[in-house]
Amino acid sequence: MRNKTSTRVVLLSDSLQAEKKTRGRAGRKSAPLLPAIKFKSDAKSSGLLQLADGRYRHVYELDGVDLAFSPEYIEKLRRDFLRLLNQLECDVQFIVTNRIFPLGGSEKFHEAVGLAENDYLKWYADYQFKWFTRISQRTYLPQRRHFLVVTTRTRSGKALANCLANLNKLGQTYRALNRQEIRTLIMQGFVLPPETSEHTQIEKFAECRSPSTLMDPLFEEAEDHLRIGDLLHGGCHIAYLPAEVEFGWLLSGQLVTAPSTVSLHIRQSKPIGSGNSQKTVDISLYFSSFGRTPGELKSNLDTLKEYFERGGARFNTGRGLQAKTFRASLPLGLDELQLSHRVTTKVAATCWPCISAIPPQKLGVPIGYAVSTREPFMLVPDESTNFLIVGANSRTNEAITSLVALHHLAVGVNVMFIGCAQTPKFIATILGPELSHSRTLTDAELSPRPYTLIDCTTRTKRSSATLSALKRTIAKWFSDEKQMLVIDDGSIFLNCPDGAKYLSQIISAAQKRGKRVILALTPQQLQAAPTLWKAFANQMIFQPGRTDASYIKQYLGIAEPIKFHFRDSFLLKCGNRRSILRLLWSPMDAGILLSNHVDMKAPKGPIARKREELYLAVKEKNPKLSETDAWRQAIYYLGLNLPT
């Protein structure tokens, strides 16, 4: 039965609205929550919207940028955004949605841990996750998406083309949304009751009922919220800009632990004062959130206000205007309230809202986080992702390759490790004979015994016979159950004729078979073998030294120098995205990999010395323990002794 204080109206078709009014349902409470919308779709404009005002809305999804780069890069971003505003001949709306997902500790994460059948590996995976959440102080994973709505009077034209061209200069790739994607994006404002997990909420979206009807929820408007279905929605608008604006002031408000939507409207305006040639625009800023109870909604909005106010902005709650405030945060290009601020484009250029870190995953093993936003980077166990690691020295390469291999081992991925240093031997010691098999490659027949981890050491002078043995080992890897090949020193192959060509063939064949390859090189080796760069289409991690930045600039296409202002940070490239990554070592990793890692120093000396002390103490108390069990206990105690 229909609620007397509510109505069921959300229409996308003006013809259906007219039909509804002819049935005698028109009235104060029967006004639709959304305006009439027509979808204009053809081969050139997928998902094009047209509202009752006759203007068109083009909706695109953007990448966003990571502000963890050098000040020079940030200044370039400001200049490019200013160019876009100065050449803007249409109205635009930037939308940033921030939805919170559990980082781990949930049922899904433990299902991933269940991929490992060995009890020790199960414990190790759980131990890594607990250490990560303890150090990073993060139990959630924000999933931030960025959208742009361009409003024009025609389906296409110079204004739209100029806007998109300037987006490219900003380093943004854009993708036009289709009809269904636009409906889903609008639908985010009408979420059904979220599932409750240990740490956060996961949204479930309703489905479209028909081609013309978006949803059919009950809704009612109160002074300080809008009830849609079983959720309360609330929004605020900017009342005062910061007294002193600088680029990035708007960004801190997006790094929150509450679900939110930020909507920035930029419209054309006339110059300030007579004879003033400086271009101005009108900007309006809204944000919205939701909750199941008035207390939860108030808490979310207060959290958003607090972060925005740190940047000097002040917000007013849209009391009595919640429906219009709500619509202003949807991808409709609507700003009915027009609570705008007329500012110069130079001031507006400080409001770039689209920041991103490493693309988040809902499931996986955390191995690090983005320096600028501290968003976790998740290593997905069943994802066939290849890593090219370019380190400043061999110790760095060895450490990172071993780190990635260890995290894969913990979730049950079988790994073959080809290395020249002592680290793989120590990993094999910790894993024990049950989980690993180590051997030195010679021209002798390879052992038919199955192995999880292999340490293939070679002589100082690599002979063609030894390379032949390596090739036979890799050929066997293609035919067995192991999913990952780790090569922590590319010189094993690159010092031989046609070695780079052979490595490229390995990577290509592995990608076709769903296997993974981790390859470590120095910048000089990468410069000498550029074909290896092209072979890797996914994640690439760099730790360039001062003299190596030119190589990285060449391959990444970055015009400005790369400067790292954070200790032990790495540059991660995922497709067209570039982020600064802080790898987070657990005590297990640090104790195994490095003798004295900069992030993990024991209180009384280098890790290697502390690790040895703990091992001897364990053996003294339990002389009957095997070497593997003794080392495992020593590593565990090492984690208890390391500072956080």
Image (tube, rainbow, N blue to C red):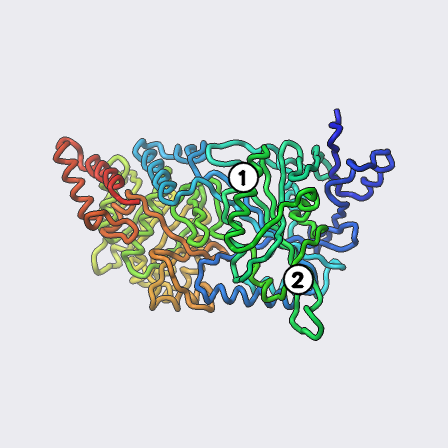
Picture coordinates of residue 343, whole percent (x, y): 63, 63
Picture coordinates of residue 308, whole percent (x, y): 54, 51
According to the image, label 1 marks what residue?
Answer: 299
Does residue 115 appear to the left or right of 607 in the view shown? right
Picture coordinates of residue 286, whole percent (x, y): 62, 50
Q: In this rendering, is residue 632 above or below 572?
A: above
Give the quadrant of the C terminus. Answer: top left
| Residue at far top of view | 1
Q: Quadrant of residue 168?
A: bottom right
The front one of 152 and 177 is 152
| Residue at far bottom of view | 275
Does residue 319 appear to the left or right of 461 in the view shown? right
Category of crowding for the residue at label 2, using alpha-carbon neighbours closer than 10 angstroms: few (below 14), some (14–19), many (at least 20): some
According to the image, label 2 marks what residue?
Answer: 342
Residue depicted at x 73% and y 41%:
33
Disc 2 secondary structure class: strand
Residue 68 visible at all: yes
The front one of 18 and 285 is 285
Residue depicted at x 39% and y 48%:
368
